[in-house]
Image (tube, grey):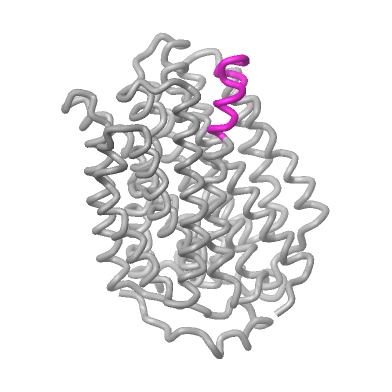
């Protein structure tokens, strides 16, 4: 099937939106010690900014998701990107630790809306046969943003200082112009938008309560999987525990994110052939034999190989999540449901960094051990949950795509 120009633009816009959103978020994980020193607080206090950002994201997923279900994906998507760009800029001018933490909380609200709206707009627009690979591409935006943050830290941190890192985070605002000029509204929303507005959120969630609970718990495990492998990695594991310099730290993070991009694309593509659940299980379980190299490697080469392979597994499993959640979502609230369950999972996992710091400090600042405990545990939990969970690969998302379901996989009902 030949793709239209709009379909290509939608995929590009959603990918760049998640990339730049992640870029803004991950700048923070390189700057814990700088923020702590600037405001004369402990590093643990500075890491609270990540907790607050993650904790606020469900609020944004709900607010922006409901607005997108009501007023359309495209306009709300643009306002959402503009919001988190401005708040990232404001972070660089915070006069105190209190102001900084408040700004990062509000930034989390804005960040919480992007993923759900962008993925809904994309999967309601593109052909069903391309969903698996596009899902991997969209989720690859997350490590792509981490990669860009590591490049920014590598080249601009020392000459400019930590505050200017946040000023760079205003760049995503430019994407709004591209969306305004080059992206059309979701055909599913244009076709069914009026009908979906007549369904109350509570009514739809009550009808799908088992699915909602399952999805929230699954996304909590997934968020421990990603944040458990990323948040403490550059600044605490590489810099504090291994005492690597800025260049080595950045290079290691870049290698890890190349693996993440590869993993997301490969396993997203694979899920179109063997199913969403099987592909997720394979990726999650492959992380277990990688743990010794990633967390306890004795040389830079071993640690780099472990970093690459770990992110192939972590983001390989994650690469299937955008399409999997959108296919499972009740159509009446597709802009709200995937984002809300994702971000509620994030809320549950928002204590990850605090947990890892606590474990590490109790074992002589061994952040490798702390990361291994979290990743090993949730890798097994994800595989078990997905093995017994639902799958609706290839389900239609609009009447215009009804014919695409003839080759769809059999639907497994929610647990």
177 vs 353: above or below: below
Res 92 quadrant in image: top right
Q: Is residue 129 left or right of residue 411?
A: right
Instruction: Based on the picture, tell me whether residue 151 belongs to the magenta stretch.
Output: yes
| Main SS category, magenta section | helix
Residue at the spot 33% in from the left edge and 63% down from the top edge = 213
Residue 317: % across, % down = 40, 59
Q: Which residues are magenta?
A: 149-164
Outermost residue on the left side: it is: 363
Residue 409: % across, % down = 46, 84
Image quarter hosting the C terminus: bottom left
Residue at the spot 56% in from the left edge and 45% down from the top edge = 144
Relative depth, front residue between 172 and 270: 270
Residue 216: % across, % down = 36, 58
104 vs 72: above or below: above
Q: Is residue 413 left or right of residue 116?
A: left
Residue at the spot 35% in from the left edge and 27% down from the top edge = 236
Q: How many numbered discs, if any?
A: 0
Relative depth, front residue between 199 and 312: 312
Instruction: Based on the picture, tell me whether residue 243 belongs to the magenta stretch.
Output: no
Relative depth, front residue between 20 and 76: 20
300 vs 392: above or below: above
Task: Please say whether residue 361 is visible from this viewpoint.
Answer: yes
Task: Please say whether residue 337 is visible from this viewpoint.
Answer: no
Relative depth, front residue between 206 and 64: 64
Residue 150: % across, % down = 53, 32
Res 33 quadrant in image: top left
Outermost residue on the bottom side: it is: 406
Image quarter hosting the N terminus: bottom right
């Amino acid at each position: 099937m030949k793709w239209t120009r709009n379909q290509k633009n939608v995929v590009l816009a959603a990918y760049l939106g998640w990339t730049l959103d992640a870029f803004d978020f991950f700048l923070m994980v390189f700057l814990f010690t700088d923020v702590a020193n600037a405001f004369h607080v402990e590093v643990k206090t500075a890491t609270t900014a990540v907790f607050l950002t993650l904790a606020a994201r469900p609020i944004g997923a709900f607010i922006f998701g409901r607005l997108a279900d009501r007023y359309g994906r495209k306009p709300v998507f643009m306002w959402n990107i503009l919001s988190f760009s401005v708040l990232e800029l404001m972070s660089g001018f915070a006069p105190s630790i209190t102001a900084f933490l408040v700004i990062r909380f509000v930034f989390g609200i804005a960040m919480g809306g992007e993923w759900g709206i962008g993925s809904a707009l994309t999967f309601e627009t593109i052909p069903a046969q391309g969903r698996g690979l596009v899902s991997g591409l969209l989720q690859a935006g997350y490590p792509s943003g981490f990669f860009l943050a590591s490049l920014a830290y590598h080249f601009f941190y020392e000459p400019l200082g930590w505050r200017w890192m946040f000023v760079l985070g205003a760049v995503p605002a430019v994407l709004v112009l591209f969306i305004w000029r080059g992206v059309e509204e979701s055909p599913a929303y244009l076709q069914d938008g009026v009908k979906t507005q007549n369904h109350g959120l509570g009514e739809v969630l009550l009808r799908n309560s088992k699915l909602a609970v399952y999805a929230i718990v699954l996304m909590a495990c997934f968020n421990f999987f990603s944040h458990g492998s990323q948040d403490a990695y550059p600044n605490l594991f590489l810099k504090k525990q291994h005492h690597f310099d800025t260049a080595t730290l950045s290079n290691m993070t870049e290698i890890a994110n190349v693996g993440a991009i590869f993993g997301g694309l490969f396993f997203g593509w694979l899920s179109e052939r063997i199913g969403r659940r099987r592909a997720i299980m394979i990726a999650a379980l492959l992380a277990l034999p990688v743990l010794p190299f990633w967390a306890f490697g004795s040389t830079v080469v071993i640690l780099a190989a472990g970093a690459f392979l770990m992110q192939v597994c972590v983001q390989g499993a994650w690469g299937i999540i955008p399409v999997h959640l959108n296919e499972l979502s009740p159509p009446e609230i597709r802009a709200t449901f995937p984002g809300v369950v994702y971000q509620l999972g994030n809320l549950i996992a928002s204590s990850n960094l605090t947990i890892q710091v606590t474990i590490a400090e109790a074992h002589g600042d061994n952040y490798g051990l702390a990361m291994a405990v979290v990743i090993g545990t949730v890798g097994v939990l994800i595989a078990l949950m997905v093995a017994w969970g639902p799958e609706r690969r290839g389900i239609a998302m609009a009447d215009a795509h009804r014919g695409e379901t003839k080759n769809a996989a059999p639907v497994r009902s929610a647990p």
